[in-house]
Image (cartoon, helix red, strand yellow):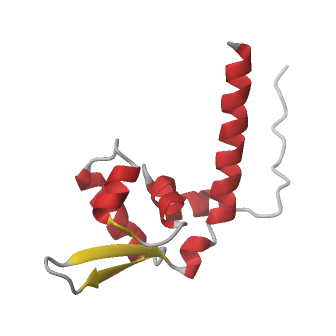
Amino acid sequence: MALIRRKNRTPHPMCPLSDCMAFIGGAWTPNIIWYLSSGPRRFSELRGDIPLVSAKVLTQRLRELEDRGILTRSVMETSPPSVEYALTDLGREFMPVIRAIAEVGQRLKERVATLE
């Protein structure tokens, strides 16, 4: 007997989660937003915060996030010039979600530790 295909009853025909993930999608993007949430950071500081990301990928992600309006890039008039990145208001809107994911991750980590 064939199964009857049920209709999706969600209120939105297009999944808003997919839209959000497409907006911030990409490896390391949530990490970058996380570390910028405490204030502006220079490129080298972000590299230290996220040691597994390559300079090339970090540069790509920072450019993408700047293009999407999630962060700002400010060139400092120092010698040599340095660049600081900071979250915009739009970028800060992602923080409650990223914090919630981090909290679930911490609980899962604790649960695994108790099982070992």
> Residue furthest toward the bottom?
77
In the depicted structure, whether residue 96 falls above or below residue 50: below
* Residue 45, x across and y down, in percent: 34, 59
Identify the residue at image location x=36%, y=61%.
61
Identify the residue at image location x=49%, y=71%.
39
Query: Can residue 25 be seen in this snapshot?
Result: no
> Residue furthest toward the front?
79
* Residue 110, x across and y down, in percent: 70, 29
In the depicted structure, whether residue 86 falls above or below residue 104: below
- Residue 3 figure quarter: top right
**Closer to the camera in the image, 93 or 5:** 93
**Closer to the camera in the image, 12 or 31:** 31
Query: Can residue 81 be seen in this snapshot?
Result: yes
**Closer to the camera in the image, 66 or 86:** 86
In the displayed structure, does residue 100 sit left or right of residue 63?
Answer: right
In the displayed structure, does residue 32 sit left or right of residue 55?
Answer: right
Q: What quarter of the picture does the N terminus occupy?
A: top right
In the displayed structure, does residue 4 sit left or right of residue 13?
Answer: right
Q: What quarter of the picture does the C terminus occupy?
A: top right
Identify the residue at image location x=28%, y=60%.
44
* Residue 114, x across and y down, in percent: 73, 19
In the depicted structure, whether residue 21 falls above or below residue 94: above
